[in-house]
Image (spheres, rainbow, N blue to C red):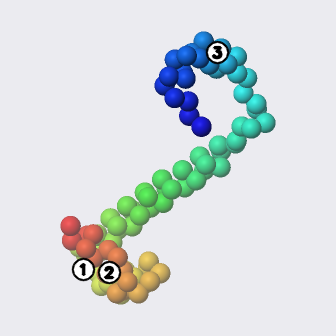
Amino acid sequence: MPYSFQYVIEHAEELARRFEEHEPDPSKFKDARPLAAIYRAVQARAQAERDILEAVRDARAAGLAWWLIGSYLGTSGEAARQRYGKLIAA
């Protein structure tokens, strides 16, 4: 439970001493490497989505049909059009 402002003022010396003398318990530390891997994967996925959008935009500019684009995306042409159509028109 957080201390009140008044409590902190009245006990400032004691709280400061406890803070300065605190020794962290290394057994409670968590390994952040898995989170860093998730972060990198999310960044890579975001870049891949940007690359796909650019490729779809180029394919449409080249006159390729939605059914063909969809087949390369692993979906139907209609699903590809619904997902990317408005994005490439913007």
CA gap, disc 1 and disc 2: 17 Å
In front: label 1 or label 2? 2
Which quadrant holds the C terminus? bottom left
Residue 45 location (% of width, % of height): 48, 60
Which quadrant holds the N terminus? top right
Q: Which residue is mark 3?
A: 14
Determine whether the residue tagged by mark 3 lies in a helix, strand or loop: helix
Q: Which residue is mark 2?
A: 82
Work out whether residue 23 or residue 82 is closer to the camera in this orientation and state it.
Answer: 23
Mark 1 Cα-neighbour bin, 10 Å: few <14, some 14–19, many ≥20:
few
Mark 3 Cα-neighbour bin, 10 Å: few <14, some 14–19, many ≥20:
few
Pointer 3 or 2: first along the chain: 3
In front: label 3 or label 1? 3
Determine whether the residue tagged by mark 2 lies in a helix, strand or loop: helix
Confirm whether residue 16 shows in the render. no
Pointer 3 or 1: first along the chain: 3
- Give left or right: position of 18 versus 50: right
Q: Hey, which quadrant is residue 53 in on the image?
A: bottom left
Determine whether the residue tagged by mark 1 lies in a helix, strand or loop: loop
CA gap, disc 3 and disc 1: 74 Å
Residue 2 location (% of width, % of height): 56, 34
Which residue is at 25% across, 70% downward? Answer: 88
In front: label 3 or label 2? 3
Pointer 1 or 2: first along the chain: 1
Name above or below for residue 22 compared with residue 27: above
Instruction: Mark 3 and mark 2 in contact? Answer it, CB < 8 Å.
Output: no
Q: Which mark is residue 73?
A: none
Which residue is at 44% across, 61% downward? Answer: 48
Q: Which mark is residue 63?
A: 1
Question: Which residue type does callout 2 highlight?
Answer: Gln
